[in-house]
Image: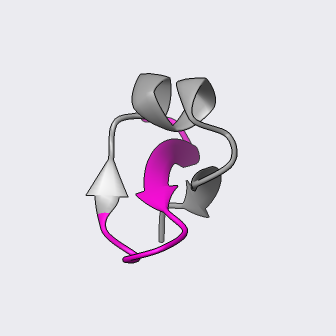
Amino acid sequence: MAKKSFKVGRSAKTGRFTTVKKAQKKKSTHVVETIKRK
């Protein structure tokens, strides 16, 4: 069975997706979002 959700990194300035590791490293400009699968 597949996971019900997954995490993705996003830049708070541009809204572009990034890696989760990069988002965790640069907390001032990035956020980590949890997205539920449908």
Left/right of residue 7 with respect to residue 17 in the rendered view = right
Task: Identify the image quadrant of residue 24.
Answer: top right
Coloration mode: one colour
Q: Residue drawn at (63%, 53%), measured in percent from left and top?
A: 34
Any part of residue 12 in sight: yes
Q: How many discs appear?
A: 0
At x 58%, y 47%, the residue is 4
Range of the magenta residues? 1-16
Classify the position of the N terminus by image quarter. Answer: top left
Residue 7, magenta (yes or no): yes
Image vertical order of residue 12 relative to residue 23, above or below: below
Asked if 32 appears above or below 12 in the picture, the reply is above
**Looking at the picture, does residue 1 appear above or below residue 37?**
above
Between 18 and 14, the residue placed more toward the observer is: 14
Viewer-proximal residue, 18 or 28? 28
Q: Residue at x 46, y 22 (%)?
A: 21
Instruction: Based on the picture, tell me whether residue 15 belongs to the magenta stretch.
Output: yes
> Percent x, y for residue 15?
40, 76
- Residue 27 vertical placement versus 36 (above, below): above
Relative side of 20 to 33, left or right: left
Q: Of residues 33 and 16, which is closer to you in this image?
A: 16
Q: Quadrant of residue 16?
A: bottom left
User: Going by the picture, which residue comes out furthest to the right?
Assistant: 28
- The image shows residue 2 at horizontal and vertical percentages of 42, 35
Residue 1 in view: no
